[in-house]
Amino acid sequence: MAEFDTIIRGGMVVDGTRMPRYSADVGIKDGKVAKIGKLATHQGGKVIDADGQIVAPGFVDLHTHYDAQLFWDPYCTISSWHGVTSVVIGNCGFGFAPVKPEMRDRAMLMMTRTEAIPYASMKAGMPWDWVTYPEMLDSIERRPKGVNMLPFMPVAPLMIWVMGLDDAKSGRKPTAAETKEMCRLLHEAMDRGACGWSAQRLGQDSVQADYDGTPMVTDLMHDETALAFAGVLAERNEGFIQMTYLPSGSDGAEAAQAHAERHYEEIARVSGRPILYNVILVNDAHPERYRHQLKWLESCVKRGLRVYGQSISIEQGFTFSFKDWNLWDDMPAWREVTTGPIEDRLMKLSDPERRPELRKVDGMTGLITNNVRDIFIIECKRADLKKYENLTVGEVARRENKHPVDAMLDIACADGLNTDFYTPPVNQCIDHMAEMITSSSVPIFGVSDGGAHTKFFTGGRYPTEALIKFVRDNPVITLEEAHWRLSAHPAMCAGFKNRGALTVGAAADIVVYDLDKLKILPMEITRDFPAGEWRRVQRAEGYHAVMVNGGMIFEDGKPTGATSGRLLRHGAAD
């Protein structure tokens, strides 16, 4: 009998610990790294030839929304195509447990706008063989999984369960009894394996609203409620928190930001646990914004506060149509005209009386979008509109003597809202990105939003883009630093056990790839979601092997059918 189930032979090991790379063979036994060194071929039941390639720990993605998709796609693509072997689900306070049977449709509708997950796919693809959170974890455990999954307790369904939907969405502060019950249920969830709790708190004009345009439950959550949840983690001395927080109010953006920073610090002190701050995004037009964030995070490090910034490390552009677009939801006029059935949206977007308010978006560079005039017209479905393709909205506006918003919406409405637009990335300056990445606060790579915004965003490609852009093509960080940032660093922050580094005794979550051949393929549309729904994807080239717990899930980019992933209760599979 062979000593090892698999030997990865002749590769260059970059182990994720920041130690210098070295040439070695890796022996895998029973899903773990058993030995690293000089191994004989006959010692392995299977041998993977890694000559000339990098052998490194699989990537760890702390921000995904695969809570629905995992039930029909065990590999959680597109993330696993790009070497991700472990994901955290239940982010932003959104999820599907606890949910009473009569509230299941409402829970799915809640995800259709804020995370842009198709309702038809959820309806057809989710088994709903649970009611409580522990029952949902058991359901996930039963499902074949291609990658590992670490689950948050999202607090929106928790608040709805205890307070009722209407009261939870009203912004009413929970009573002492309700808070006590929510904390009890959070304890119960963590007893069964939840890694902590999550919340999106973006106020009345949330940029990610409910399906009807109203704020999400957690958008109006009170600071006192968040502190009560933080106290649960303090009592247990375990777990971590993911939170996106920017309160709305009349005091202005600077006052709101200052309040948010104080609140993050307070939660970190009360809980004594790590808190993930969302999100750091470089905006080339406003570098003062990310510089302020980095300065504050660096001050948290100096004061010993465990506030870790999560960064968008990819060039973030969006391909969208007005059938799906929702990322101007922080503007009430836009939120109103982009909700409701397609026929209603078309009528409202065509209404000349609404246009003055809609025009106000032009000239604004938001967190994730550029000026309207810089948006490209990619594809029109009507033949007589093809003349606009590959022009910017600004170019059309000048040619036709229109306001840019009118130029864009006149085309969209004439095309039945089928026109595809592209808003270019706000973060294309490599010097700005390097400044963010090399900050002493050490931002976490990612915020892939995997499983969400599937019709206009492909953030799951971020590990491949980081290796290409910041290591191979631009000397921003070393390969050793990159693998620490992509694997060990997020694993340590989130409490993964024996994962994130390629060391003896660790779980055999491994990627084998050729750095010179690494490539992100062009965006394409696939119809691989339940109920015939489509999504935009970007695949990768250059990965020879992706292994999860010793099982080969992809070989040269092709799925093997192996489902060796695990539900990581309390950060571990055992």
Image (tube, grey):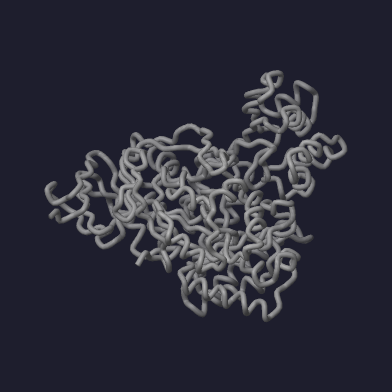
User: Which of these two is toward me, 474 or 164?
Assistant: 164
**Which residue is pictured at 64% across the width and 31% down the height?**
420
Indicate left or right for 205 with 79 as reference: right
Can residue 73 be seen at all in this image of the molecule? yes
Can residue 57 be seen at all in this image of the molecule? no
Q: Is residue 415 above or below residue 445?
A: above
For the image shown, how many numbered marks are present on the structure? 0
Q: Position of residue 107 (x, y in %)?
A: 64, 58
Q: Position of residue 365 (x, y in %)?
A: 68, 43
Residue 320 picture quarter: top right
Q: Position of residue 375 (x, y in %)?
A: 66, 33
User: Which of these two is toward me, 249 or 511?
Assistant: 511
Residue 455 picture quarter: top right
User: Which of these two is toward me, 265 or 537?
Assistant: 537
Indicate left or right for 204 with 574 as reference: right
Indicate left or right for 157 with 249 as reference: left
User: Which of these two is toward me, 387 or 285?
Assistant: 387
Residue 316 picture quarter: top right
Q: Residue furthest right?
A: 353
Q: Position of residue 94 (x, y in %)?
A: 60, 59
**Which residue is pictured at 34% across the width and 34% down the height?**
517
Q: Quadrant of the N terminus?
A: bottom left
**Which residue is pictured at 65% across the width and 77% down the height?**
179
Q: Quadrant of the C terminus?
A: bottom left
